[in-house]
Image: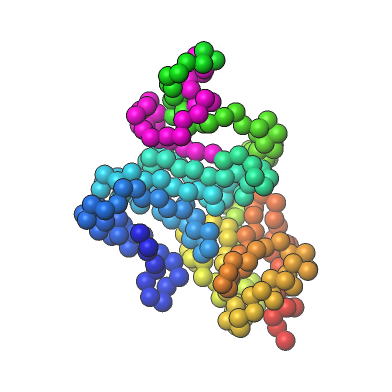
């Protein structure tokens, strides 16, 4: 289902998402709701609990793509109730490019062996996995969806990163810093560069992660991006006109944010 923000708006309203779910549920033409926890382009954080309830009230299964949410914002998947979720670990979890993914399967589905799946030997229950039977009996929960044994080196890299998260106090502690860090960036951009930059990520900290998506009224996004890269700033561009900046609380500082804005001022202000 193609779904766009209201005219003149850059992000989606929760009530409009729920209305769209109900509309298609009544029409009987939707089999699954699948959304991103944090939208990659706008940086909008969606209300997982409320949207999940709306889908389940309509008896539609719902899953979440948490690639830009895991390690970025707190998640409560069991209590929020989605049927499943999946994510990569190379973004905010810092495990490195191409590393292993993760998935969540809600407890209510833990022992349902009738669900469709890509069944692999590593998902067979552990007690008799090496019997090599021709009958697939899945392990309970998400482990029943594993296809093969993961790379030890990949797991080691992810484990090292998760240990650092734990040492820093976990996602909740980091989230507190994240709101301040991104808020500081937002304030500096508004105070010094509002004539040259538009922020279209939601302004309410509860409706975003650490990312701010920036557009440039002068149409010079790629020029700005190239000059930021030359100055050693790590950010990325997304066509047609967005630079994404994400001060990450685990390893970015307020000084980093200040330096970014100083670089932008040098590039943009005549």
Most foreground residue, 253 or 88? 88
Colour scheme in use? rainbow
Q: Is residue 269 left or right of residue 191?
A: right
Q: Position of residue 52 (x, y in %)?
A: 35, 48
Residue 6 in percent (x, y) is at: 37, 71
Residue at image point 42% right, 19% down: 135
Q: Position of residue 205 (x, y in %)?
A: 51, 60
As drawn, 49 above or below 183: above
Which quadrant of the rendered structure holds the N terminus? bottom left
What residue is drawn where x is 38% and y is 35%?
116
Quick check: is 105 in the magenta stretch? yes
Give the magenta part as a residue range.
Answer: 102-129
Q: How many marks?
A: 0
Along the line of sight, the residue nearer the viewer: 240 or 66: 240
The image quadrant where one finds the C terminus is bottom right
Query: Quick check: 184 left or right of 232?
Result: left
97 in magenta? no
Q: Which residue is farthest front?
A: 134
| Residue that appears at 39% across and 28% down | 110
Please indicate, yes or no, whether residue 73 appears anywhere in the rendered image.
no
Answer left or right for 19 relative to 126: left
Q: Quadrant of residue 171?
A: top right
Is any part of residue 112 visible from this angle? yes
Q: Furthest residue to the left?
A: 26
Q: Is residue 60 above or below residue 207?
A: above
x then y, percent, for residue 35: 42, 53
């Amino acid at each position: 289902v193609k779904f766009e923000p209201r005219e003149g708006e850059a992000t989606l309203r929760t009530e409009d998402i729920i209305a769209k779910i109900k509309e298609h549920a009544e029409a009987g033409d939707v089999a699954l709701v699948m959304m991103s926890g944090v939208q990659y382009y706008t940086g909008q954080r969606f209300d997982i609990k409320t949207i999940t309830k709306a889908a389940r009230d309509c008896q539609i299964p719902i899953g979440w793509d948490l690639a830009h949410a895991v390690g970025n914002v707190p998640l409560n998947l069991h209590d929020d109730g989605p049927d499943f979720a999946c994510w990569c670990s190379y973004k905010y979890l810092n495990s490195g490019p191409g590393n292993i993914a993760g998935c969540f399967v809600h407890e209510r589905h833990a022992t349902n062996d009738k669900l469709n799946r890509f069944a692999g030997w590593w998902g067979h229950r552990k007690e008799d996995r090496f019997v090599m039977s021709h009958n697939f009996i899945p392990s309970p929960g998400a482990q029943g969806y594993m296809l093969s044994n993961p790379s030890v080196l990949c797991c080691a890299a992810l484990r090292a990163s998760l240990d650092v998260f734990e040492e820093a106090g976990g996602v909740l502690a980091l989230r507190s810093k994240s709101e301040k860090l991104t808020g500081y960036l937002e304030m500096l951009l508004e105070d010094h560069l509002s004539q040259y930059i538009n922020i279209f990520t939601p302004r309410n900290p509860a409706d975003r992660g650490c990312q701010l998506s920036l557009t440039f009224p002068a149409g010079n996004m790629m020029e700005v991006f190239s000059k930021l890269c030359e100055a050693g700033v790590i950010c990325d561009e997304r066509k047609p006109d967005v630079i994404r900046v994400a001060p990450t609380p685990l390893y970015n500082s307020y000084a980093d944010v200040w330096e970014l804005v100083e670089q932008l001022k040098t590039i943009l202000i005549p």
